[in-house]
Amino acid sequence: MNLSQDVMLEFNCSQYDFDSDPPDVSQHFDAFGIIGLGIAYGGTASSGLLTLLFFIQICSNVRKCPWEWQRSLSWIVSMPMIISWLSLTSFLVPRAGNLCSIVKQSYMPFMLMHFLDLALMIDGDEEQILNTLMDNRVPMSLCASPCCFFGICCRSSIVTRRGFRAMRRRVYQAPLWQFLLTMAAVVLEIAEINQFLPEYIVMPLFQTLAGLNVLMCMLGNWGFNVIVKTFKGLERSNWNRRMKKAHALTLFIAIMKLQFFVLGLLVDYTDYIPCSPPAVSPVHMKQNMDALLTLAEALLFGLVFTFVYRVRQCDIDRAIKGDGAERSPNFFLIPNMQTH
């Protein structure tokens, strides 16, 4: 392994014949030299810091919560740490990149599900919350991101059990569909299906899988944002700063999803992603760029999560009676939504 050589990047990569298999660890660090070693050390340090922050959160924050909250809250605050270690592994061991990508792409929407579970648990069960929302005729607007960016907006309607649960199902189905679609694309790529089928079939097949993956991601985020936006009609709930927590989580996921999608377009349709012959193709360079960007984002949002998801005693006091029993939801409606 030669770490002293300079990194040689080429943008006219079509002239090279790259192996379809990712480079091994030795070839990878030969291509990136001392810069690759620096990224490895920096990524290990940032992942270690996020691990330390996670254990501090567990010991000083999660532990003081009622035990019903602890599972979902632990999953949420672990997200930056898990994403960071997956990205670091993808960079250090290129041949583990596909596995890390499958886990990461399925793990992110899984956190939205845990957030909804925790929010409903803190404010009471779903039936009690639905009764409160319907009794006070709280509106539910379907014009929420990311669908609103494409003009798919519908007028507001009053919250109903069927509508609320339909939105919740969108959130719960997203991790499963994204796992299956990502797995299918990776398996077909490893099987080198282009050797058995013509290009005019293979290319649309992969584009269809990618498009369905994006659609499932959008529907899951849309359902989550519709539900969160519905709760904005409530002045406050038993969970302090719930909207800030939701925005931090969705922004983290949206940045990583958009980055992965844009890098995929760049490597498929442009020459903007370089290569490092003879081992590192543009496809593998895209994997490294995604890992490097995600390491930085995980560190940033790990620090944000440490403060945003800090549980205050007032949160617990709102949800727990003096005798230690959980109380029913205590929503405080804004004045123009109160019924008289």
Image: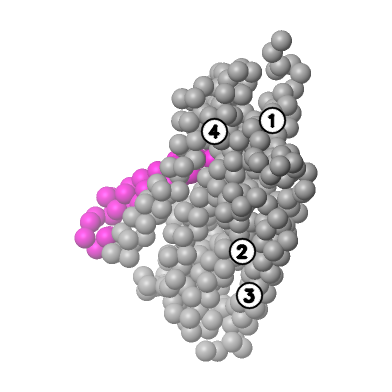
The kind of secondary structure the magenta stretch mainly shows is helix
* N-terminal label among 4 and 2: 2
In the rendered structure, are the residues bearing label 1 and label 4 in contact, judged by CB atoms less than 8 Å apart?
A: no
- Which percent across, then down, holds residue 269? 46, 53
Identify the residue shown where x is 51% and y is 63%: 286
Q: Which residue is mark 4?
A: 126
Kind of residue at badge 3? Thr
Q: Which residue is mark 2?
A: 81
Kind of residue at badge 2? Met
Kind of residue at badge 4? Glu
Residue 330, which numbered label? 1
Measured in 3D between alpha carbons, the distance from the residue under mark 4 to the one under mark 2, in whole angstroms, is: 30 Å
Residue 44, which numbered label? 3
Which residue is most to the front?
Answer: 323
Magenta residues, start to end = 193-222
SS at mark 1 in the image: loop
Measured in 3D between alpha carbons, the distance from the residue under mark 4 to the one under mark 3, in whole angstroms, is: 41 Å
In the rendered structure, are the residues bearing label 2 and label 3 in contact, judged by CB atoms less than 8 Å apart?
A: no
Measured in 3D between alpha carbons, the distance from the residue under mark 2 to the one under mark 1, in whole angstroms, is: 34 Å
* N-terminal label among 2 and 3: 3
Identify the residue shown where x is 55% and y is 43%: 117
| Number of the front mark, 4 or 3 | 4
In the rendered structure, are the residues bearing label 4 and label 3 in contact, judged by CB atoms less than 8 Å apart?
A: no
Quarter the C terminus occupies = top right
Q: Is residue 194 magenta?
A: yes
